[in-house]
Amino acid sequence: MRSFLFLITLVVSKFTFSQFTPLSIGQKAPLSDLQMTSTTGEMLSLKKMNQEGLIVIFTSNTCPFVIGFNDGTFGGWENSYNSIFEKAKAHSIDVVLVNSNEAKREGGESLSDMTKRKSDKGFMMSYVLDKNSELANAFGAKTTPHIFFFDRNLNLIYTGSIDNSFEDKRKTDVPYLMNAIDSYSKGKKIKTKSTAPKGCSIKRMKN
């Protein structure tokens, strides 16, 4: 099942994502003033949330890569969200979940669905709705999840996957994002700045 879904992800990425070019390392976060509705009803922007850094996680309430596979072969990356938040918070780095699945607002990705998911999973960070996939388009976000880690000046310092836990043939576990947080907080160079994002395609409205 995991191998099949991975192949589907590669095919989708080849034909669906080509029009969206992800931000490059060093680029400034676009639309940092964009106001997005959070599950609490508060209007939030990246600039408002940024402290000593900001981690943006494009996520979903329905994607198996996020919530886990029904057959139990993969637990889903959302299970690591709170651990990421706690580690980041210890260094005054904020974390925000962003739902850009505009084409599935009536299929499990509405604001009420987001509110329920946040409550059910006990997410400790803000969860905002990206109307019309505006932020995802500006970022060139491809998947759920897709990580964008910015420094205190909102310059991109890491992007891609949370870790390599979905790679069956991995020789060792590599927590890419946690390593990036460690290096940044210690003023050290981030060794792996970019990895391939894996997950479901972001469900944008067709033009």
Image (cartoon, rainbow, N blue to C red):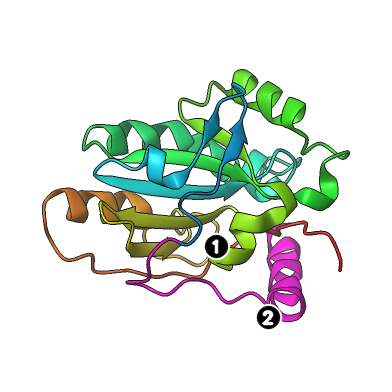
**Which residue is rendered at x = 58% and y = 65% of the image?**
138
* Viewer-side residue, 170 vs 34: 34
User: Residue 112 vs residue 92: left or right?
Assistant: right
Residue span colored magenta: 1-29
Say which mark, if any, is on residue 110: none
Q: With respect to residue 81, does 10 lie above or below?
A: below
**Could you tell me which secondary element the residue under label 2 belongs to?**
loop
Q: With respect to residue 70, does 25 lie above or below?
A: below
Q: Earlier in the sequence, mark 1 or mark 2?
A: 2
Location of residue 166 (image quadrant): bottom right
* Viewer-side residue, 124 vs 175: 124
* Viewer-side residue, 75 vs 134: 134
Residue 44, horizontal then vertical, whole percent: 51, 36
Q: Amino acid at mark 2?
A: Ser
Location of residue 11 (image quadrant): bottom right
Residue 115, horizontal then vertical, whole percent: 67, 24
**The stretch drawn in magenta includes residue 56:** no
**The stretch drawn in magenta includes residue 3:** yes
Q: Are marks 1 and 2 in contact (CB under 8 Å)?
A: no
**Which residue is rendered at x = 19% and y = 55% of the image?**
183
Q: With respect to residue 8, does 113 lie above or below?
A: above
Name the quadrant of the N terminus: bottom right
**Which residue is rendered at x = 82% and y = 41% of the image?**
105
Residue 207, horizontal then vertical, whole percent: 86, 69
CA distance for labels 1 and 2: 26 Å
Q: Nearer the viewer, mark 1 or mark 2?
A: 2
Q: Which residue is mark 2?
A: 18
Q: Amino acid at mark 1?
A: Asp
Q: Which residue is mark 1?
A: 168
